[in-house]
Image (tube, rainbow, N blue to C red):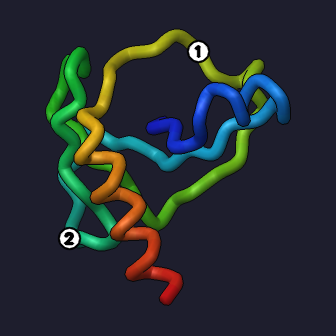
Amino acid sequence: MLVLSHDVFNERSGTVIAVALTSKEPKTVFPLTLETNAIGLSKRSWVKVSQIRTLAVERIGRRLGIAPEGELARVIEGLNEIID
C-alpha cells in the first residue's frame, strides 16, 4: 500500500488513506496505474491509483519504501482524472 494521508491525520483518526501496489505489470496505464520509483522496494512496482482504500492504522505493517514527493502528486493527479 502507498499511504497518501498525512501522519497527523493518521494518528488522530486511527486510519490511513492508501492505494494498492502491485509487482505484476499492469495492462492499463496512467491514470489507472503508475510505475513507482519508491526507494527501498525490492521489485519493480506499480501504484494502482484506481484502488483507493481507508485502512485501520493497526493493519499497516512496516514501511518498505518511500515514494518521492513528486510521485505522490502524480498519484493525486491520477485520482483527480478518474473522479472528474
* Quarter residue 68 falls in: top left
Residue 29 marker: 2
Q: Looking at the picture, how far across and down is residue 20, in whole percent?
A: 47, 46
15 sits left or right of 23 in the view? right
| 46 is higher (above) or lower (below) than 8 | below
Residue 61 marker: 1
Which badge, 1 or 2, is on the more N-terminal residue?
Answer: 2
| 38 is higher (above) or lower (below) than 25 | above
* Quarter residue 48 falls in: bottom left
Instruction: Please give the count of numbered marks on the rendered protein.
Output: 2
Q: In the rendered structure, which amino acid carries the disc numbered 1?
A: Gly
Separation of marks 1 and 2 at Cα, in angstroms: 28 Å
Badge 1 local density, few (<14 within 10 Å), some, or many (20+)? few
Direction bottom: furthest residue: 84
Q: Which residue occupies 52% across, 59% down?
A: 51
Q: In the rendered structure, which amino acid carries the disc numbered 2?
A: Val
Q: Looking at the picture, how far across and down is residue 82, in whole percent?
A: 44, 81
Direction front: furthest residue: 8
Asked which secondary structure carries label 2, the reply is: loop
Asked which secondary structure carries label 1, the reply is: loop
Q: Which residue occupies 63% across, 45% down?
A: 17
